[in-house]
Amino acid sequence: MRGRLCLAGIGLLLGGCAQPDEQVAVPAPDPVVIDAPAGSAGGACRLLDFALVEEATGVRFDVAAASEQGDTHSCVIRAEQTAVPDLTLSVSETSIDLAAFKADLMPKGARAVPGLGRAAYRLTVAPAQKQGPVAEVGWLADDGRLASLRYTLPVGQARTDAEGFTPKLVTLAKQVDTRAL
């Protein structure tokens, strides 16, 4: 009994030390970092995986954003700390046939890519003011969808750098299953 009274008395003494209006500073907790998969952004991001993209391209991305407009699903991925480079995947429903794809959708100066969908092309775009060069791969998928991967390089890089990157985009494009949308 005597021990319980002592503990109760100590509690009263300690409790009475703080002023009722006095605020006690509590340190802020460390931020919680969660590695979310690209697919968690929805849209065409469901077709990409950060590890798959890094394996195919050699570039590490960790932020994804998706958009859907009608029958078109898009995804942009990039590194959290930098706006470029970035990678954009767009997939659209289409009724276009092979002949129309080759005649109307393959950009001037594009080169055919064998072994990707029903038909495919690769293309580079020269750097523009405030934008680096761009590498692009577009294809008519076997499931009747149009798809494109577009990689924007940082400002200051040459078009030849984009040319060297297009085989990596082709490798990645061959792993994108547009039927999964």
Image: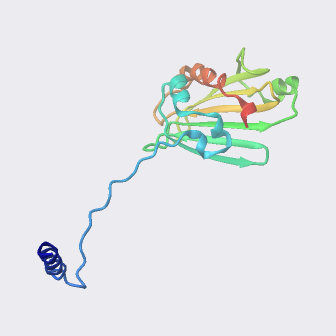
User: Which residue of the protein is positioned furthest toward the bottom in this rendering?
Assistant: 20
Q: Position of residue 159 (x, y in %)?
A: 54, 26
Q: Position of residue 143 (x, y in %)?
A: 81, 28
Q: Residue at x 53, y 25 (%)?
A: 57
Residue name at image x 48 percent, y 37 percent:
155
**Residue beneath the point at 72% across and 34% down:** 180
Q: Quadrant of the N terminus?
A: bottom left
Judged left or right of residue 5, residue 48 is right
Q: Residue furthest front?
A: 1
Percent x, y of residue 11: 17, 76
Which image quarter is the C terminus in? top right
Q: Nearer the viewer, residue 131 or 84?
A: 84
Q: Quadrant of residue 72?
A: top right
Q: Is residue 36 found left or right of 136 in the rendered image? A: left
Q: Is residue 1 above or below residue 53?
A: below
Q: Nearer the viewer, residue 177 or 112?
A: 177
Measuring 26% from the left and 67% from the top, which residue is drawn there?
A: 26
In this view, the residue in front, 141 or 179, is: 179
